[in-house]
Amino acid sequence: MTNAETKATLSFSDGSPSIDFPIYKGTVGPEVIDIRKLYGATGKFTYDPGFMSTAACNSSITYIDGDKGELLYRGYPIEQLAVNCDFLETCYLLLNGELPTAEEKVTFDATVTKHTMVHEQMQFFFRGFRRDAHPMAVLVGTVGALSSFYHDSLDITDPHHREVSAIRLIAKLPTLVAMAYKYNVGQPFVYPRNDLSYSANFMHMMFSTPCEEYKASDVLVRALDRILILHADHEQNASTSTVRLAGSSGANPFACIAAGIACLWGPAHGGANEAALNMLKEIGSVDNIPEFVRQVKDKNSTVKLMGFGHRVYKNYDPRAKLMRETCYEVLAELGLENDPLFKLAMALEKVALEDEYFVSRKLYPNVDFYSGIVQSALGIPVSLFTGIFAMARTVGWIAQWNEMISDPEQKIGRPRQLFIGSPTRDVVEIESRTPASK
Ligand code: SDX
């Protein structure tokens, strides 16, 4: 980053001396005002709940232009990556900053493949869960448990240890997500196979059984691979910020990823794909759309249009466009062009994009609106949708974690607050206490 030509001057109406702050320019996107000396100079904090106007770090990994609906991974537009690359190429790019050569890709793919098995002890963690436990609860537990296995790579200041942890996480998430599914449906766990691609291996671990071979069509495997590419990273979203904050204390990387999974689970974040599909099922038919939209607009109702809106995108989420295209391809491949949920989703999208309430609030479909329909068509159960999101986002989380750990400016994250509670007061003995006024 470079110093911008201008600076920011803060002046006070009470006559306190004004203060200048440097402004930095990045490669592209909003400039930032460096306020790090504000508290020391004024005894005042900034106030920005939800971090609507706060850059928490500098990063070279992912850039989003919310107004243009642009998403770049290391400078490459998501539209080009989704068409020209596969997920492991995208993982290499996010981790290393450049796309792999043909030779580098062979080596990287082989390295990931060789780490897809989990320790044989891992299977026993599943037995503690109810069979109907939500897969995200299982993933928080089992990915967190991975932090107890790898004592050969605990020095996070060692780049090689960080690389080994990254490879292990990228390789083992599909195995754990598939195990969570098999545990839920009461089928035996299926081991990964080294002769299959990353996404074909996941479909194998999900849908094959000891009784018969399972071969996913290339179209379905490619569709899953594209879903993973679209979800791989997304700047400083809530779960990535969770991983960065957890990692800033020097915590174990596997435990930090478990924290990211916990945050992603929320319906306002990654849990929206599960919520969006359940919303479509609840609406049921195109005839019910007007009543549903009325409820969404009713300030007294808590009904939201799941899969719509975004903190950054105030235009169409570029991933939603690609996800809708993938929908067409998969449904056509499966002869489900007339899938009622897909028809309903497109009708709802059309209504919302023409309705002043949504237009004025710049509410457009986001990546979660169509991803549930695609995943359903792939045979993935609704409760596992966010688990697939976590599987994809693991590379983004670990790339951002790695960037933070290797940043010389890195410090433990420790935000402050505006205190609005009780001023100092004395404890009185219990006999003299009176009930607090409600
Ligand atoms: C992801 O950050 C990321 O990058 C996340 C993500 C990633 O890849 O990591 O892109 C993945 O999380 C996508 C978002 C998935 N979430 C949903 O689809 C859930 C539904 N969306 C909303 O919860 C909401 O849009 C958020 C949380 C996504 C964004 O919320 P903001 O930016 O805080 O916006 P807001 O809540 O301040 O809303 C502004 C206005 C409000 O109305 P008014 O008070 O101005 O009258 O828009 C309304 C909101 O009520 N609004 C919605 C709405 N989203 C916002 N109204 C109806 N339906 C919605 N979905």
Image (cartoon, grey):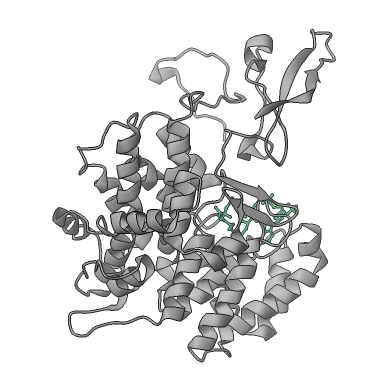
Q: How many marks?
A: 0
Taking 218 as reference, is 361 above or below it? Answer: above
Front in this rendered view, residue 423 or 276? 276
Residue at (58, 87) in percent of width and height: 340
Residue 194 figure quarter: bottom left
Q: Position of residue 64 (x, y in %)?
A: 65, 49
Q: Position of residue 133 (x, y in %)?
A: 31, 63
Taking 417 as reference, is 171 above or below it? Answer: below
Residue 107 figure quarter: bottom left
Residue 110 figure quarter: bottom left
Q: Is residue 303 visible?
A: no
Q: Quarter holding the C terminus?
A: top right
Front in this rendered view, residue 291 or 62? 62
Q: Quarter holding the N terminus?
A: top right
Front in this rendered view, residue 406 or 262? 406
Residue at (68, 27) in percent of width and height: 2
Q: Is residue 118 visible?
A: yes
Taking 52 as reference, is 280 above or below it? Answer: below
Question: Where is ligand 1, by quadrant?
Answer: bottom right
Q: Position of residue 206 (x, y in %)?
A: 31, 72
Front in this rendered view, residue 74 or 324? 74
Taking 303 as reference, is 344 above or below it? Answer: below
Report whether 131 appears left or right of 8.
left
Report whether 11 appears left or right of 73.
right
Report whether 319 appears left or right of 20.
left
